[in-house]
Amino acid sequence: MAPYAHRLAPNPVPIFYSGGPTIAEFRGIDSFASPEDWVGSVTEVRLPDGGTGGLAHTEDGTGVRELLQNDPAGWLGREDHNDETGLLVKLLDAGQRLPVHWHPDRPFASAHLSCAYGKAEGWIILSPARGRVWLGFVSPPSKEQLDHWLDTQDGEDMLAHMHEVVVDRGDVIFVPPGTPHAIDRGVFLLELQEPTAFSFVLEYGGFNLSRHEAALGIEWSTAFDSLHFHPDLVQDSVVRDAVRTSPDSLFPASADSFFRASVLDATRRSSVIDTFAIAIVVDGSGTLRAANGTSVAVAAGTTWALPAASGELVLEGDTSVVVCQPPAHLPTR
């Protein structure tokens, strides 16, 4: 039997900031107990209470990891029986302003965190109202300045030294690894990222994190080595109204080695997938048909795991679907 798209159950993962009601509203459920829904995740993390979380399930209770392990060729497009997808997709509801933080790149993660993946990420803004994000420092901070912020925990001063970007629904932003950023309260977004939870939280005060935890247990002097400065960051990373206007990939080409995203809607009816993928139905309702002969009815707020064997996807109906895929080539471990 050909593998087919599976509707995913909500997957709340406890995080150190508040949020969740907008995810519940988007999904059409009564409540959601986390600011992040890890959609179709096979990325497992240790929780503050000592347990683990992050692994997603379908609506019928089947683990996504189990689907991939049982049919790696059909779901992943390869035969190596490794359930790694190379992708983590989230719905993120900022119930408060997120702290100033950044994520390491692959070389740093390999050298210091024993992982082939860093954490590049990309945001697709779903908020209906204008919001704010902060992206990168305006000029490279000195080590003395970074130490000062670490000691004072003056978040407003950190933000004053960053690019403030006003965002609208449909905008997309690529956040290269090593780029400091923050998201304002009220912003709701779809996030694609590398499959890790690595964050260096410069502004840890007030977020129930210790100074040691905020640096992932390594020395801050080492953590600062993972910080990068991009002089043309905003120009190169922000794509306005991409969800409505981009004919192919939503993100800049510089994101292709980390993840890919495209849109199916009234004007873009088909797309070809060659890997495991996640579909987020943004609005409307319709039918998603795959080249392997399978089809599913989709509606706003639903999320789906798509097998590589789907091939060409064709959308029918008045709806909009974001299709998220990992990079064409995963990093070598």
Image (cartoon, rainbow, N blue to C red):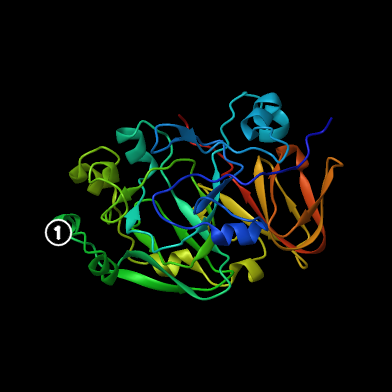
> Can residue 31 be seen from the camera position used here?
yes
> Can residue 249 be seen from the camera position used here?
no
Q: Amino acid at mark 1?
A: His
Q: Say above or below: 228 vs 240.
A: above
Q: Residue at x 36, y 47 (%)?
A: 199
Q: Position of residue 187 (x, y in %)?
A: 49, 66
In the image, taking residue 324 as reference, residue 237 lies left or right, namely left
Q: Residue at x 34, y 61 (%)?
A: 230
Along the line of sight, the residue nearer the viewer: 184 or 322: 184
Q: Say above or below: 131 vs 204.
A: below
Along the line of sight, the residue nearer the viewer: 49 or 181: 49
Q: Quadrant of residue 104?
A: top left
Q: Position of residue 332 (x, y in %)?
A: 47, 31
Location of mark 1 (residue): 148
Q: Quadrant of the C terminus?
A: top left
Residue located farthest toward the left when viewing the structure as drawn = 144
In the image, taking residue 324 as reference, residue 50 lies left or right, namely left
